[in-house]
Amino acid sequence: MTDTQIITAGLSLKGKLAGLPSQPGVYLFKDARGKVIYVGKAIALRKRVQSYFRKSHGALSKTDLLVSEIDDIDTIETDSEAEALILEASLIKKYGPKYNVELKDDKSYPVIEITGEIFPRISVVRPASLAHHPEHSLEPAERRSQRVERPHKKKKNATYFGPYVNPGLIREALTIIRKIFPFRTCNPFPNKECLDYHIGLCDAPCIDKIGKREYLKNVRNVRLILEGKRDLLYQKLKKEMESLASAQKFEEAAKIRDQLRAIGALYSGTKDINYYKEAEQLQRALGLPRLPERIETFDI
């Protein structure tokens, strides 16, 4: 998926509803002026978006009001639900759609916090005072009941991403991201390494195992993922890898190559990085223009 891959542009509303893809992705509802009034994510775009337009029974709801204002729909396909979740939050932050504010209840949803410390800490928190996420009132019940952290006060100089309606999924995505770009979650800053260092989840800035510049580079890359800037991240890492290879720093170049593969695994919806390596090898062997997504075999 590219950062601007809008799938359904140019069709009528009725035509878009009929031709929506079944893949995971993000949908954007627009009013008659072309303004984005609601952003949501879906495991299957067609099923989710079409569910809004089924006949309403009973009292007029806020969802009915939303549907009455929809004049156009854009969808962006993603390779996995985790990618859709990250993209959804970045688009809500970008457009500030009114129904993502109004279609909410009294429950706060978790956000990802990146602190403003010298070695920033990244963690999932449930804010006490940040805006609530709207999706709760529009999503199926199975997406609602997951553990969240205790209410958390907004920190000065900290950056926040989200909120995310599915706490379990964003924790899972962040755990995978942390294996690619290690960072600290400890509070307060310790004076010796912890278990996270020994299992590869943190590079232990507390004992100078990583310098400030390299650590902040990891944080920058995490930010790019959370902002939905996948293509820009690929470009930066590829350029860095080629520069290191030219300087014959092959070990460092190989590390970035593995990071690129792991990012591919994250976006393809698999946690198995070896699977992504094999897909990459198959792409090269067969001269395919893109990574294979499915292999079919027939027993004759």
Image (spheres, rainbow, N blue to C red):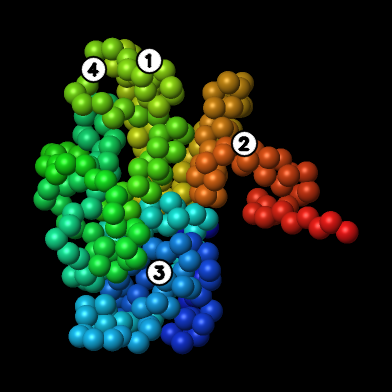
Residue 18: x percent and y percent? 51, 82
Q: Amino acid at mark 2?
A: Asn
Mark 2, secondary structure of its residue = helix
Residue identified by numbered label 3: 27
Residue identified by numbered label 4: 190
Residue 62's quadrant in the figure? bottom left
Mark 1, secondary structure of its residue = loop
Left/right placement of residue 293 relative to residue 214 reads right
Mark 4, secondary structure of its residue = loop
Q: Viewer-nearest of labels 1 and 3?
A: 3
Which one is earlier in the sequence, the residue at label 4 or at label 3?
Answer: 3
Q: Dot 1: few (<14), some (14–19), or many (≥20) neighbours within 10 Å?
A: few
Residue 83: x percent and y percent? 44, 53
Residue identified by numbered label 2: 274
Q: Dot 2: few (<14), some (14–19), or many (≥20) neighbours within 10 Å?
A: few
Residue 44: x percent and y percent? 48, 66
Q: Is residue 234 above or below residue 162?
A: above
- Using the numbered discs, state the Cα–Cα distance from disc 1 to disc 4 in whole angstroms: 13 Å
Which one is earlier in the sequence, the residue at label 1 or at label 3?
Answer: 3
Residue 254's quadrant in the figure? top right
Which one is earlier in the sequence, the residue at label 1 or at label 4?
Answer: 4
- Using the numbered discs, state the Cα–Cα distance from disc 4 to disc 3 in whole angstroms: 43 Å
